[in-house]
């Protein structure tokens, strides 16, 4: 039968693991700085006190994480 197909999960919460460092840094700074493109009360409050060096360290960490694989096979529930 072969290997099961895998795809990225579609959820309301974006996947951060494995994203590119520049992408993460740019968007974390936008949240912190209150950019109109990234208005989100929760993320703005989380990033409000982060220094650029902390954002860089966080982005590096998230980049190093492997993105989880999601199976396309349906799951059975009873």
Image: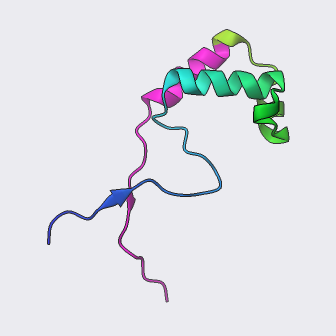
Percent x, y for residue 55?
65, 19
- In the visual, does 5 lie left or right of 61? left
> Which residues are drawn in magenta?
54-78
Relative vertical location of residue 70 with respect to residue 43 in this rendering, above or below:
below
Residue at the farthest front position:
37
Residue at 29%, 62% (x, y): give it: 5
Residue 14 x/y as whole percent: 60, 46
> Which residue is outermost to the top?
53
Position of 11 compared to 71: left or right?
right
Q: Position of residue 57 (x, y in %)?
A: 57, 17
The image shows residue 26 at horizontal and vertical percentages of 64, 22
Q: In the picture shown, does residue 58 fall above or below 8?
A: above
- Res. 45 image quadrant: top right
Q: Residue at x 56, y 26 (%)?
A: 23
Residue ranking furthest to the left:
1
Q: Is residue 69 magenta?
A: yes
Quadrant showing the N terminus? bottom left
Q: Quadrant of residue 16?
A: top right
Q: Is residue 65 above or below residue 71?
A: above
Q: Nearer the viewer, residue 11 or 78?
A: 11
Viewer-nearest residue: 35 or 56: 35
Q: Residue at x 81, y 19 (%)?
A: 49
Instruction: Assess whether residue 23 is covered by the magenta stretch.
Output: no
Locate residue 32: give its quadrant: top right
Give the residue drawn at x 38%, y 52%. 69
Give the colouring mode of the picture: rainbow
């Amino acid at each position: 039968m072969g290997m099961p197909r895998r795809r990225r999960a579609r959820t309301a919460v974006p996947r951060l693991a494995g994203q590119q460092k520049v992408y993460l840094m740019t968007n974390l700074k936008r949240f912190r700085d209150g950019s109109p493109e990234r208005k989100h009360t929760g993320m703005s409050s989380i990033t409000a006190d982060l220094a650029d060096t902390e954002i860089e360290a966080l982005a590096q960490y998230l980049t190093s994480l492997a993105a989880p694989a999601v199976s396309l096979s349906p799951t059975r529930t009873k």
